Structure formats: structure tokens, C-alpha cells
Amino acid sequence: MRLAYMSVYRYTHRNGRMASGQIREKEKKRYNSIVFVVWTSVPHRSANMSGADNQRLPLKEKFELMPETLGGQFRKDFPPYLDGLVKSFPHRYVTTPEFAKNAEDVYNLSPRPDDVYISTFPKCGTTWVQELVWMVVNDCDFEKGKKEQLSIRSPFLEMNYMLPTKLAEKFEKEAICRKANSPLVDKIMELLCYWNLMDWLRPFIRKAISLVLGDCLRDLEQIDQMAGPRIIKSHLPLYLLNPQVLNTSKVVYVARNPKDVIVSYYHYHRLLEFHHYTGNLEAFADYFMTDRVYSAPFFPHLLDAWNKRHHPNLHFVFYEDLKRDLRGEIVKISQFLGKKLSDDQLTKLTEHLRFDNFAKNETVNCEIGKEIGLMNNSGHFIRKGKTGDWKNHFSPELNERIDEWMRKNLEGTDLRFITELEQQD
Ligand code: A3P
């Protein structure tokens, strides 16, 4: 199966110099006949993340291409999604073909007792809580925190697989060219791509980028080897994480009301060049509600964690509660992590995490993404930080449709959201 995929990859890759319409048609025909099965038989890495090879856990979830994401309005609205999106079965998780290929490796990362996982659907306040947890675990060492990007201090588990290969290649090439600022380097990079040497050279290129820009990414192997305590961010639903995570490590799950998530995710899809969303908010809300965005579907992600909220190793926190009483929520998270902060530490950490300070903090605000071409200048990653911003964006008609969608999905559950706050910050 892996070989089959490799040949498809080579096929599309080598034909990258054909007219784009021609490629798309050929790719479409070919992809339509392929089921993306997560390779359970051939691990990507020689060193198994769980130890010996015979302990490797097979991932039961399988992935299939979503043919509707290869053409029509969807392709126009998300131009960089050259290979479309895939959906898993039986859980219907939407992701990239690149992640599907590596899902089992991620699943096999061994959890440790001193790990803390920050688990979220995107845009629920992940970065905010990552920094909070890192500070609590590291005894509020603000000086140490300043020295490295949060993405290094607290790595993003599946990040390396979120970019389609061709886009990753493009960003790597552009980052090097921009820094080198020399036509000769441009030419060399072009030739490397032409000869398909980028895959082979990727580790060296990443090293070079890190040397020039500073480290901003850890891959799965680096996460595996990282010294503890590790604070690992992941947008994966719990069933795609190693099944021992909850019994071994601590998990802080952050949830946010879906109306603000839709607005925040919309802006994020416009800001990030690897989404480069060109449609309007209303169309985006439809993509969101019909599970055609990365990490969808929204409700099962949250409900799975909500139903496990009484597990002693899981702490469930709402973004809205952090907005209402940041200090109080820091105390609760510290207790969950077995830490006690002094009054002085609590005061300083609360200030450190306040939106205005956070937005200025270069180790968390991701402005570095603009330097390497991952983000455009249409806005900021740490954007507005409010509960109820949806009221500035939704028409009454759209709001009604979202209410109905929420009602249907929450039926028979006791999960409820706060969508407006009288007082925040
Ligand atoms: P908005 O786009 O609504 O502003 P994630 O880290 O999961 O991607 O979540 C990003 C959202 O959290 C963004 O929401 C961002 O502004 C908000 N956020 C980040 N830091 C924050 C802070 N210190 N206070 C409040 N909101 C914050």
C-alpha cells in the first residue's frame, strides 16, 4: 500500500511541470480510484516510537479522499489544497493526505507519566493554555520562556504533517531564497525541486532554516526524544492519540463556543498561506458546518473529551471561563498539575497571559510565520481574543442556521456553551 501511494506521489510530483488544468484532471481521475489506507504494515520510521517493532499499535481508523475537495468551488476557495482533504472512518475526521500517511506514527508516540497534552479543536485557545501550562510546569520561569519559541518549548504533535508535501517544499524553498537573497541560490533551489531532491535534503534544509531563523519546529522524532516534562499540543481528537495517553499522562482539554470558533477559524484560514481561503465568512461557516475544514467535525471532538471530563487525568476548561476569571482558572490548572503557585507568581502569570501582553510576546504570537512566508499580512495570529465577536460577523439568517446546527448536535448531551459574556478581562 505504501508503495502504491509512493507511486501516486511520484506521478503527481513529476508531472508538476504540466499545465495545471491537465494535472488536476489526471490527478483527479487517479485519486478517485484510490482509497488512502493508513499503512499499518510498513512503519515510516525504523525506530518504533513505542519501542520494539512488535509492540507497534495498529491504527484502526482508515482514511479516504474526499473527492469533492479536488474541484469546483471548494478548490477555488482553498487554492493551496492541491491534493484535497481526506476523511477518516469510522469517525469522519477531516485532515490532509500527508497526515493520513503518518497517522499511525503519531498514534505510536509513547506517552510518559510527566507529559502534559494540550488537546483542542483549533482556535479554542490552544496557544494561550500552552503558555499557561508551560509556565506552571516550569515554575513561572519568565526568563527561560523568553529564550525559545513556544513551538519549541511545547511542540505541536502533528504539525509536520499538516502541510501538503508540495507546499512544504515551496515554503522551505522560499524561506531559503528570501534569506539568501541571491539569484544563484534561487536557481539551485529550483533545480533541487526539479530533480525531486527536496525530500532527501529536507532534514538539512530544516537545519539551515533553524540556523538562520532560530528553531521553530520539532518533528515527531525530536518530540519522541525530547527531555521531559513535555508539554505537547495537539488538535487531534483523543482517539487518534496513543490509547495510553489518558491513563499515563495528563491532558488539558480546551473548548470554546462554536460561533467564536467559526469566526476565528475563518480569519485564520485567510491569514495562513497554506489555507489561503478566498471565500467569504458565510461560505466558510457552511464548510465548517458540513465538515469540510481541517479537524472537522467540531462536536464529536469536544463531546469525546466532555464525556471523559471526570477522568482524573483530564482537565476540561472553557475559553469563556479563562476570559471570565483567568486567575481562578490558572489556580485550577495548577492544582490539576500538582503545582502550587505563590500569590506573586499568580499575579505575574495572569498579567503575562493577558491578551495585550500575549499579542506582543514574540515567542507566542507567531509573527515569525510572516518572515518565512507561512502567513500574509492580513492580520495577526493572536487576533482579538473576545467572547462574542461573532456578533460583529453573522447576519441574523446565518446566526439562526448556526443555532439550529448547534441545537441538533447538542441534542441528548449536557454540553452547553456560553456565547456572550457581560464581563471579560
Ligand atoms: P480570536 O481569533 O477570536 O481572536 P488557538 O491558539 O487555539 O489557535 O486559538 C486562537 C484564538 O485564541 C484566537 O481567537 C486568539 O486571539 C485567542 N487568544 C490567544 N491568546 C489569547 C489571550 N491571551 N487571551 C485571549 N484570547 C487569546
Image (spheres, rainbow, N blue to C red):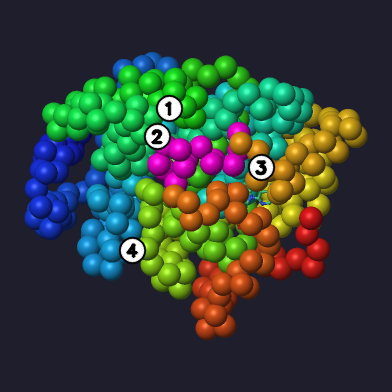
**Mark 3 vs mark 4: which is more N-terminal?**
4
Judged left or right of residue 285, residue 259 is right
User: Are the two marked residues, 2 and 1, in contact with CB atoms closer than 8 angstroms?
Assistant: yes
Q: Amino acid at mark 4?
A: Asp
Mark 2 vs ligand 1: CB below 8 Å: no
Nearer the viewer's eye, disc 3 or disc 2? Answer: 3
Cα separation between marks 2 and 4? 24 Å
Q: Amino acid at mark 3?
A: Lys
For the record, the magenta segment spans 363-375
Cα separation between marks 3 and 2? 26 Å
Q: Amino acid at mark 1?
A: Asp
* Residue at numbered disc 2: 160
Nearer the viewer's eye, disc 3 or disc 4? Answer: 3
Cα separation between marks 3 and 4? 31 Å
* Residue at numbered disc 3: 360
**Mark 3 vs mark 2: which is more N-terminal?**
2
